[in-house]
Image: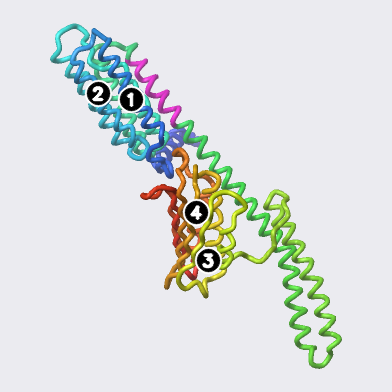
Amino acid sequence: MARPAPPVYGGYVSSAVNSFLAEPRAPDPPARVWWDWLLLAVIALSATLETIFRTDLIWQPAGLVVCVGMSIALLWRRTHPLLVTVIAFGATTLLDTAAGVFADGDDPMAILVTTAWVLMLPYALLRWGSGRDAAIGMGYILGLVAVPEVVAGTLTDLIAGFAFFLLAGALGAAIRYRTGSRLRERDQVRLREREQLARELHDTVAHHVSAIAIRAQAGRTLASTQPAAAVDALVVIEEAASRALSELRSIVGALRDGQEADLAPQRGVADIARLAAPAHGPRVDVELVGDLDGVRPMVAAAAYRIAQESITNAVRHARRATRIDVRVIGESDSVLVVVLDDGEPAAASPPGYGVAGMAERAALLGGTLEAGPSAGGGWLVTATLPRTGA
């Protein structure tokens, strides 16, 4: 009799665990945002009021210092979630243990209720950390929660503590999964659009261009002996070129949500001077410096678009701006685009699509772009583009 096949559940579990541990950190975690500082202020105020009005606390100064001092570590919870978790939970557990050992009373209280902000740490572990960091951090948290409750024999408190921290971690994992799904869906949409564009170009435009090339070769061969045949070839070339141009117009229009495609000649460095005459808003001064001849068309077009977008952003977002200075500097191996306004930057917020698009445009050419408040006031955009492109 054949032996039954071994169960595969263990293999599934092992594969799932290995996949979780191999999960990399979430890409591009924000170092800190404006409401992080608001959160710290709320924690400090709440802890101070709790220390003043609660009479059942022992070691009030120590509890206040631990609560407020460790909350500063929240500023690094996205970039270093495991380290922040170890430090914050270690400090609060050490204070709680010391209160139980050295203080008088049956159930001494040294931990402030405000210290509940530690619930943000399991969320940060699962939201921003790697799989290995999340496993180590959650094991560390649950271990610190479990030991005193097991020693005291309070099973109910143990279950409640596990539930709180696991729920916070599950919320972080859910947000991470949703964000990842949206990014993957966006990438899939882009991939489908590129595949469709490639098919359109191959099936239509490439066909017409091939016909143009063949007719041009035939016309050149027959031009000396059969001038009429050469003229016929030029007629065919003209018709094929018109059809190819029409197909290109429709494809570009589809990519722009049905808008009419702009097939005007590509803008370059020389066209940046035209940006000095805006219809409204602050004055725009343009200065072209250095050797700007011989710059590749793609680099010249990128310089123009970056200058144009920077001016547009300054007009829209800079408060009380009166002047925008644009300098394009041609160096031996690069082209430098510097745009500076004298306005007040808008309230701090994540970079918009305009800045992201300019940075992507510069990166595609092997260059760099930096945008942010200037030391002397206003908003500064600096792009460095290699003359030959990437």
Nearer to the camera, 330 or 12: 330
Let me know if residue 113 appears in the view. yes
Nearer to the camera, 258 or 232: 258
Q: Crowdedness of circle 4 by 10 Å Cα count: few (<14), some, many (20+)?
A: many
Q: Which structural element holds mark 2? A: helix
Compare marks 3 and 2 and give the one earlier in the sequence.
2
Question: In the picture shown, does residue 305 fall above or below 2?
Answer: below
Image-based side of 43 in relation to 208, left or right = left
Q: CA distance from mark 4 to mark 2?
A: 52 Å
Q: Quadrant of residue 262?
A: bottom right
- The residue sitting at 43% across, 70% down in the picture is 331
Marks 1 and 3: which is nearer the front? 3
Q: Amino acid at mark 4?
A: Ile
Compare marks 4 and 2 and give the one earlier in the sequence.
2
Let me know if residue 23 appears in the view. no
- Residue at the spot of label 3: 299
Nearer to the camera, 18 or 235: 235
- The residue sitting at 44% across, 27% down in the picture is 170
